[in-house]
Amino acid sequence: MLARLLSAASALLLGACSVIGVRSGTEEPRFEVLERRGEVEIRRYAPRLAAATTVAAPSEDAARSEGFRRLAGYIFGGNHGRTKIAMTAPVAQASERIAMTVPVGQEAAGEAGWTIRFFMPASLTREALPEPADARVAIVEVPGATMAVLRYTGVPSAAAARAQRAALLAALRDGPWQPAGAMEDWFYDPPWTLPPLRRNEAAVPVTPR
């Protein structure tokens, strides 16, 4: 009885923390901060594994919702090992429409999509990760990269994310770092987190000028 009460209390506490923006116990990919330029951080990330899916959808928000469902299915047991995998943060979404490619999607003439990724816990190797049951989900290695990152709060609607991506590019325009790849949006909190306490980030790979 005591164990059940403690478990219930823990679940309630974690739920309350997520509402007020505290991500208790949620693993994030490791990175090194190389430099801070105003509100922009230049971070170095090591290679990491992710579950990824590409979604053809009429909007970024719809793609994010569908991609989240597919990937959540994978980590909550929708895999050939019926294994549950710990949730990590952030959820990453490619912020530009990109041509759909194999293995994370399918080619479709005239169509485009958004790639959504869940990063896998650092303790798990590719061999240790179960195969997805959904053929639209793939395990991919995200190469190490130097990223420029701009953090912001609030509800990350498509319009808000677009504005923050533009602000990040503007902040980089006259500095020593230049964009070197596709932009991404990173989301750290569940939708019910209070908007002023939500953590969102616009990110882009960079190289020195």
Image (tube, grey):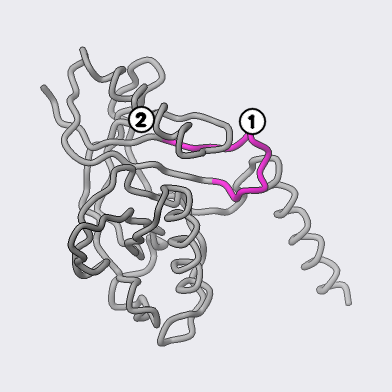
Q: Main secondary structure of the magenta part?
A: loop
Which amino acid type is marked by label 1? Answer: Pro
Q: Nearer the viewer, residue 96 or 43?
A: 96
Which amino acid type is marked by label 2? Answer: Arg
- Image check: 11 left or right of 196? right
Q: At which x and y percent is residue 40? A: 36, 23
Task: Give the farthest residue toward the front.
Answer: 110
Q: Pointer 1: residues within 10 angstroms few (<14), some, or many (20+)?
A: few
- Image check: 207 left or right of 92? left
- Image check: 12 left or right of 173? right
- Contact (CB < 8 A) between labels 1 and 2? no
Q: Which of the two labelled residues, at mark 1 and mark 2, occupies the earlier sequence position?
A: 2
Which quarter shows the N terminus? bottom right
| Residue positioned 75% across, 60% down in the render | 10
Magenta residues span: 189-201
Q: At which x and y percent is residue 150? A: 39, 28
Element under label 1? Answer: helix
| Residue positioned 34% across, 64% down in the render | 53
Q: Which mark is residue 165?
A: 2
Which quarter shows the C terminus? top left
- Image check: 137 left or right of 105? right
Task: Give the farthest residue toward the right.
Answer: 1
Q: Which mark is residue 196?
A: 1
> Which image quarter: residue 168?
top left
Q: Nearer the viewer, residue 64 or 107?
A: 107
Q: At which x and y percent is residue 131? A: 34, 81
Q: At which x and y percent is residue 138? A: 30, 71
| Residue positioned 40% across, 53% down in the render | 58
